[in-house]
Amino acid sequence: MSVVASTHLPVPAIHGGPKAVEAAPGDLFTWPIVMKEDEEAVLEVLRRGAMSGLDVTRQFEKEFAEYHDVPYALAHPNGTAAILAGLWALGVRQGDEIIAPTVTYWASALPALGLGATVNFADIDPKTICIAPKDIESRIGPRTKVIVVVHYCAHPCDMDPIMEIARKHKLKVLEDVSHAHGGRYKGRMLGTIGDVACFSLMSGKSLAAGEGGMLVTKDREVYERAVAWGHYERTGSYSKWATCDSPLTDPELRKFAGLPLGGCKNRLNQLASAFGRVQLKHYPKRIEVIQRAMNRFWDLLEGTPGVRAHRVDPKSGSTMAGWYSAIGLYEASELGGVPIERFCDAVRAEGVECRPAGNQCLHVHPLFHEADIYGTGRPSTLVDKRRDVRQGPGTLPNAEAFSARCFSVPWFKHDRVDEIERYALAYKKASASLRGGN
């Protein structure tokens, strides 16, 4: 029996025992995995001076769309640009509202302010850390246009009730899949369930292109609007107004060919496109390894007091894909109410980096309460004096308790049994060291 599976654990390091993890991790956590194939693809673009071209990017878009089994994919310089284009393509305009989870990276919601819209933040589900479907419907108002869902830390949102709410109220759904490339919800690929999906491809993501973003949709109209927003070079030339190979079929959009309606230049550098193509090619097999490794880690920790896995039930048909920004859930009540910081201290004593994890709540940030971004004399989030959607502390309880419940865990890139057992042992020993509030 391995040490981690034994009921007789070594003395915790925080109490003077040996560390669970002594050896350097090597490439256990190295990401992205860069091979000669990646280097040659990037160098080919560099050598022919094609960085600002479109040929490699179009191929990347085609392959990305095929991977998701959708007809349209459109590359962007980053995920934030993709979300801004996606919101506009879904009809968000001045004075409108979107609904978004308060626990997320700012780019999931803040682009709405650039469109003259505002954000009504929703609470999260304490188990999934994703937007709580039950908190969405009460936030819908006469100017609500889009529900933004974020598959947070790779955990799929509960999409069935969300889509039911959206269809009932004739709202659009934007999936932010920046944490969950290749993940599935009840067998369906994330990013293919809502009306449009946006992905960050920055170097830290589970599918990395160095820096970049992607928008995917099944809707031709949404795709054309996203092209018209920031891909002027694809709509036609300024002098000719339109070209025969323009993707725009909407007469209203074709009328403005040659200039970006959003005043944005959203072309992706082809060095990133080349790198992204190679990464995408190997991604399905690599995430299979990551899923085996991460599920192994959590299986070893099953039943550990104070520790809960942030993962899906494999029998549900849902997956955590590349398991980006892996976290665990802390149950202080099982460890005598000891705060999460002390638990993390105990894990670090075992030789494993561990800290309270996740993004801070956006709904309490001063930007969403006070900032007059456009010099109008009132907060820019107050787009309608008759309906103030700003929320202060205490309004979203699950989200506000988030930082006391979530902690970082290793993000394994290789399924190495002995090493994973040592890391799991660190968390077991940390739990043991705090039982009874000691």
Image: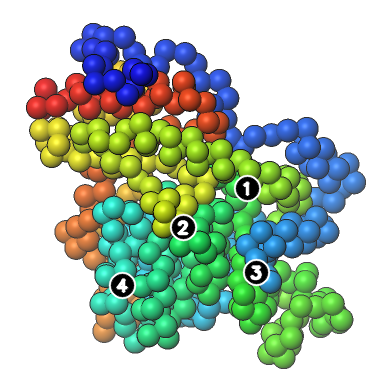
Q: Marks 2 and 1: CB-CB under 8 Å?
A: no
Give the SS element for disc 3: loop
Q: Which residue is mark 4?
A: 136
Q: Residue at x 50, y 42 (%)?
A: 291
Give the SS element for disc 4: loop
Of label 3 and label 2, which has the lower sequence position? 3
Q: Quadrant of residue 377?
A: bottom left
Camera-side residue of 428 and 58? 428
Distance CA(mark 3)–CA(mark 1):
17 Å
Q: Quadrant of residue 67?
A: bottom right
Q: Which residue is mark 3?
A: 70
Of label 2 and label 4, which has the lower sequence position? 4
Residue 230 seen in this snapshot: no
Distance CA(mark 2)–CA(mark 1):
16 Å
Distance CA(mark 4)–CA(mark 3):
27 Å
Graded by Cα atoms within 10 Å as few (under 14), some (14 to 19) or many (20 or more), the crowding at tag 4 reads many
Question: Residue 355: where, in percent of width, then height?
Answer: 33, 33
Distance CA(mark 3)–CA(mark 2):
20 Å
Camera-side residue of 49 and 213? 213
Q: Residue at x 63, y 47 (%)?
A: 284
Q: Which residue is mark 1?
A: 284
